[in-house]
Amino acid sequence: MKYLSVNTYPMLSINTSKLLHNAEKVLQDCKKQGIELAAVIKGFNGIEEAALQFSKAGYAQIASSRIDQIIDARNFGIKGPFMLIRIPMLSEIKNLVEYVDISLNSEISIIEAINDECIAQKKLHGIVLMVDLGDLREGFWDKSELIRVAQKIENNMLGLKLMGVGTNLGCYGSIKPTEEKMNELCQVAEEIERIIGRRLEIISGGATSSYPLVLNRTMPKKINHLRIGEGIILAYDLQDLWGLDMAGLYQDVFTFKAEVVEIKEKPTHPVGEIFIDGFGHKPAYEDRGIRKRAILATGKLDYAIHDKIFPKNIGMEVIGSSSDHTIVDIQDCKDNLTVGDILEFNISYPSLMYLTNSRYVNIEIVEGHYE
Ligand SMILES: *Cc1c(COP(=O)(O)O)cnc(C)c1O
């Protein structure tokens, strides 16, 4: 394992059996509606033991925005094909062609560079052209430019295979994936298919935020591919934001564990002249009188945002943090806590990203459905 700390805690525990269960369930649901999936491993920084579950489950591609994670996965022996889901940098084209099978693209100069490198390395690389449907992150905005590029790849670029089209929604512009947006993508795909005279293999309708259309059975038939991370690994957003029943999925694949180093009763309002906190902010402090709190030996450096970690113990509330400390209100908690205890947390996507990237957080791999 590459994430090693001299301390045992803080620790992030990953249950690979639960992850495999989620991966298989989401894939089955999608396959029933003719949709293949790329499993996105960037949410947990590509940790190989976790990424391995996706290839075990039989995903069409293993995907990441970071080429390093793909290279690590390959070296670990994980079966591809691998897909790069961030537009490749010109400076990474050599590695792209060597290690990655398919990439999402939107710039002709980058596509040309990939083609040249493919010819040099005698390889074939798959291209999915991204269409911007209003979220205003990556993708062609001008449809005629998109079609010109598609034709050029199809007819003039021997190192490339035009695999299809894709879109991304709900990232920058917060645009909701709807049936209408999906139909727009299908129309673009049909236009390209008419011009090149063959069917495209991949019509990629987005990320986890497009999965509700599968569950609601409103996904247009022509959409045959999604790129899913969060919906498999945490499965929170669909329940919290979309009100969908995620009962068939484990929401505790990941457990964050941190150690108590102080327990004391203290005032809830700081004492003295309030200036700024450790990060230059001036927070508001509610005076709730004297309350019992615990300090944990973990902080923003490990998980970034304390609002995004959730104590499993009932009656516990995370009230603040600095880079290396977390303050938890335990006044209403019935558990008998002492210094040295390990507290457990559920985590969200942002904290997962940081926790799996920290050299101070130990990674523990566990198996079994009842862990
Ligand atoms: C991150 C990302 C995904 C996966 O997003 P989830 O919300 O984790 O499913 C899919 N496609 C692209 C282009 C991405 O950047």
Image (cartoon, rainbow, N blue to C red):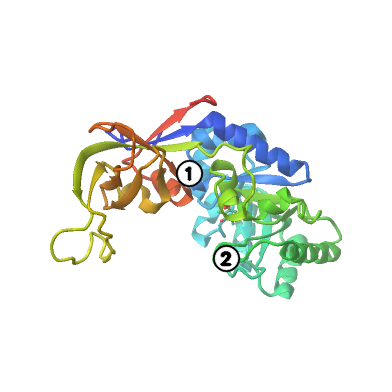
Is 195 on the left or on the right of 67, as rendered?
right
Q: Residues within 10 Å of mark 2 (few under 14, many from 20)?
A: few
1 or 2: tag closer to the N-terminus: 1
Q: How far apart are the two marked residues, 1 and 2, measured between alpha carbons?
A: 23 Å
Q: Judge by depth and name the residue closer to the eye, 355 or 110.
A: 355
Q: Secondary structure at mark 1?
A: helix
Q: Which residue is mark 1?
A: 44
The residue under the point 25% across, 58% down is 287
Q: Position of residue 280 (x, y in %)?
A: 25, 65
* Label placed on residue 174: 2
Is 63 on the left or on the right of 12, as rendered?
right
Q: Is residue 34 above or below residue 166?
A: above
The residue under the point 73% across, 57% down is 164
Residue 229 visible in rendering: no
Q: Judge by depth and name the residue closer to the eye, 160 or 308.
A: 308
Q: Is residue 352 above or below residue 184?
A: above
Residue extending furthest front? 289
Exactly how many numbered labels are in the figure? 2
The residue under the point 55% across, 56% down is 93
Residue kind at label 2, given as amino acid type: Ser
The residue under the point 56% across, 51% down is 240
Is 321 on the left or on the right of 117, as rendered?
left
